[in-house]
């Protein structure tokens, strides 16, 4: 338990200070980016900031779930998924720097909220915890698809990152489903969608 607590604390500090390093190379476009104008750059920066916040929340969620499960195999699954999310976190942070944009000023708040949800889900049992993963990843996948439609056509660098993230999130959801995820009640799903809408709308600007 002490090791798990130390790991959770280390993950929290790395996530909130930006000290993350991707294990995989950042996805790149097959062709060169066109030059973005100021409006396109602002839009890409806002969308990638929202995506970065999503990865901050994913780190918190998986860290809390790994901390609460008593199943060593499931803990390993959560930890492996968190490593993919660390890649996403580093990639989106890198792209924000390239666009001259900043991360959300409310990242500590987003992290704390997601961590609390992860702890609650874990306390309700592994099946429920996995159910939260399935529904979260389903919503994230939809959200990333919307961003692929909204990103400037010329911003191929951001598109490459978001496309790979979408592939990874779909895999995480499928793995959680195969591991025995419970189906969440519709009111819970609706609350998750509302919370996500508040987060994405706020992070777009702040």
Image: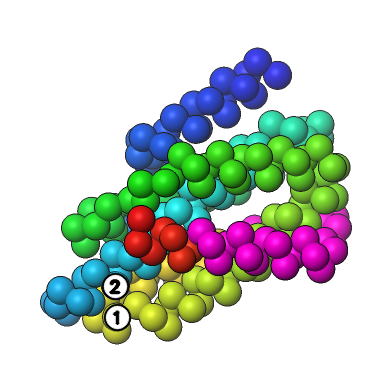
Query: Is the C-beta separation of discs 1 and 2 under 8 Å?
Result: yes
Q: Secondary structure at mark 1?
A: loop
Q: Give percent across and percent down for residue 152.
A: 29, 80
Dividing the picture into quadrants, the one containing residue 36 is bottom left
Between 35 and 167, the one lying in front of the other is 35
Q: Main secondary structure of the magenta part?
A: helix
Q: Is residue 186 above or below residue 182?
A: below
**Which residue is under mark 2?**
43
Q: Residue at x 21, y 62 (%)?
A: 99
For the N terminus, give its image quadrant. Answer: top right
Task: Identify the image quadrant of residue 206.
Answer: bottom left
State the residue at coordinates (42%, 78%): 148
Q: Is residue 173 magenta?
A: yes
Q: Is residue 131 left or right of residue 89?
A: right
| Residue denoted by label 1 | 152
Closest to the observer: 176 or 53?
A: 53
Residue 66 seen anywhere in this rendered image of the structure: no
Q: In front: 25, or 21?
A: 21
Residue drawn at (27%, 52%) of the image: 102
Q: CA distance from mark 1 to mark 2?
A: 8 Å
Q: Is residue 3 above or below residue 89?
A: above
Q: Which residues are magenta?
A: 172-199
Local packing at callout 1 (Cα closer than 10 Å; few below 14, some 14-19, many 20+) is some
Residue 63 screen position, x and y as percent:
61, 37
Residue 193 image label: none
Q: Point out the residue furthest to the top here.
A: 2
Q: Residues within 10 Å of mark 2 (few under 14, many from 20)?
A: some
Q: How many marks?
A: 2
Q: Position of residue 171 (x, y in %)?
A: 63, 63
Mark 2: secondary structure:
helix
Residue under the image location 82 percent in, 61 percent down: 184
């Amino acid at each position: 338990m002490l090791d798990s607590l130390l790991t959770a604390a280390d993950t929290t500090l790395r996530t909130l200070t930006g000290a993350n390093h991707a294990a995989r190379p950042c996805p790149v476009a097959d062709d060169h980016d066109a030059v973005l104008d100021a409006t396109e750059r602002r839009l890409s920066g806002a969308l990638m900031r929202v995506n970065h916040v999503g990865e901050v929340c994913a780190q918190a969620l998986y860290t809390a779930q790994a901390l609460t499960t008593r199943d060593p195999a499931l803990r390993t699954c959560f930890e492996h998924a968190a490593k993919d999310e660390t890649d996403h976190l580093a990639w989106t942070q890198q792209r924000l720097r390239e666009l001259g944009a900043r991360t959300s000023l409310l990242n500590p708040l987003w992290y704390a909220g997601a961590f609390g949800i992860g702890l609650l889900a874990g306390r309700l049992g592994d099946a429920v915890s996995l159910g939260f993963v399935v529904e979260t990843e389903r919503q994230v996948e939809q959200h990333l698809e919307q961003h692929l439609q909204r990103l400037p056509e010329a911003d191929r660098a951001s598109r490459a990152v978001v496309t790979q993230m979408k592939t990874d999130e779909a895999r995480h959801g499928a793995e959680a489903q195969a591991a025995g995820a419970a189906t969440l009640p519709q009111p819970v799903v609706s609350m998750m969608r509302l919370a996500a809408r508040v987060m994405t709308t706020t992070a777009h600007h702040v």
